[in-house]
Image (cartoon, grey):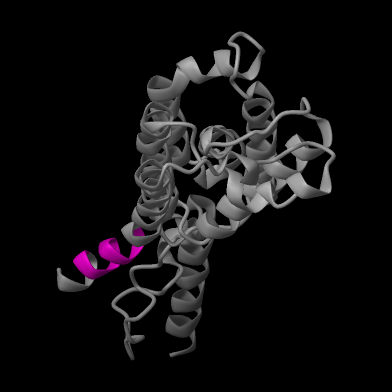
């Protein structure tokens, strides 16, 4: 029980670290009356390239921050618990490739906020269910559809001042990342033989292959045994 609790605490550390980081940055901006938007992604300008690393942790205001905080924590927690072997690499692949795509193709404006990463995480969890096709992944995909179905409207330019490019590229990168790691089996998906650790008995009541033989094979063995018995009886 203690090991299970400790393991859960370890898995929740990364989501909580991300949450703490984005809140510290926004609170610092508010208290010091500074603006870190210049550290966002500015497409095709080398000064804006650093935003690939920094933009997801910068927000325009507390409303913007709140809209990203809950899904960021929920989705990273899902990944840490159910895709623990690929969770952290997937997160940083999504962040880097989404940011790089925005830098290459988006409008010439500063792009900030974690929404691109959030869209990537939504796509990762959903498409992992499609690619992996096991019950657990499919259930998680359905949960994400129920919780975040409204996000699909964000991949088109329907609101002024919103980086729909980050949403679109985040979703595409999330699909790519899910496909990239689709064959990596999580520990909960591994088939365990319950008899693997038991010692082999020295004797068996029935032959090991008794229940593997067909009815015809058993009948042939019975006839052969009777013939041998008749032969032995004649010789005696």
Q: Give the range drawn in magenta.
A: 5-11
| Residue at screen point 38% across, 24% down | 147
| Residue at screen point 48% across, 57% down | 219
**In the depicted structure, whether residue 200 falls above or below residue 207:** below
**In the depicted structure, whether residue 220 falls above or below residue 122:** below
* Residue 82 placement (x, y as % from top left): 41, 51
| Residue farthest toward the top in the current orientation of the protein | 158
Would residue 182 be found to the left or right of residue 206 on screen? Answer: right
Q: Determine the image quadrant of residue 168.
A: top right
* Residue 218 placement (x, y as % from top left): 47, 59
**In the depicted structure, whether residue 37 falls above or below residue 223:** above
Q: Determine the image quadrant of residue 188.
A: bottom left
Q: Does the magenta stretch include residue 94?
A: no
* Residue 154 placement (x, y as % from top left): 57, 17
Q: Looking at the figure, which quarter contains the C terminus?
A: bottom left
Q: 65 or 33, which is in the foreground?
A: 33
| Residue at screen point 49% across, 59% down | 213
* Residue 79 placement (x, y as % from top left): 45, 49
Q: Main secondary structure of the magenta part?
A: helix
Q: 75 or 160, which is in the foreground?
A: 160
**In the depicted structure, whether residue 200 falls above or below residue 90:** below
| Residue farthest toward the front in the current orientation of the protein | 33
Would residue 107 be found to the left or right of residue 54 on screen? Answer: right
Q: Please tell me how many numbered marks the rendered image carries.
A: 0
Q: Looking at the figure, which quarter contains the N terminus?
A: bottom left
| Residue at screen point 45% across, 55% down | 189
């Amino acid at each position: 029980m203690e090991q299970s609790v400790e393991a859960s605490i370890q898995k929740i550390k990364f989501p909580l670290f991300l949450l703490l980081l984005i809140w510290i940055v926004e609170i610092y901006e508010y208290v010091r009356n500074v603006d870190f938007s210049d550290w966002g992604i500015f497409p095709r300008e080398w000064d804006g390239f650093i935003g690939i690393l920094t933009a997801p942790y910068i927000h325009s205001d507390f409303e913007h921050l709140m809209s990203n905080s809950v899904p960021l924590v929920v989705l990273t927690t899902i990944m840490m618990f159910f895709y623990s072997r690929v969770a952290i690499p997937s997160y940083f692949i999504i962040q880097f490739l989404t940011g790089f795509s925005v830098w290459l193709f988006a409008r010439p404006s500063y792009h900030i906020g974690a929404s691109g990463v959030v869209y990537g995480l939504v796509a990762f969890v959903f498409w992992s269910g499609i690619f992996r096709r096991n019950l657990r992944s499919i259930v998680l995909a359905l949960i994400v559809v129920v919780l975040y179905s409204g996000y699909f409207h964000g991949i088109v330019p329907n609101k002024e001042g919103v980086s729909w490019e980050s949403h679109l590229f985040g979703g595409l990168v999330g699909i790519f990342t899910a496909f990239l790691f689709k064959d990596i089996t999580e520990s909960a998906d591994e088939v365990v033989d319950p008899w693997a650790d038991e010692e082999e008995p020295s004797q068996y009541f029935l032959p090991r292959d008794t229940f593997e033989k067909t009815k015809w094979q058993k009948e042939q063995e019975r006839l052969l045994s009777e013939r041998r018995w008749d032969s032995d009886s004649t010789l005696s």
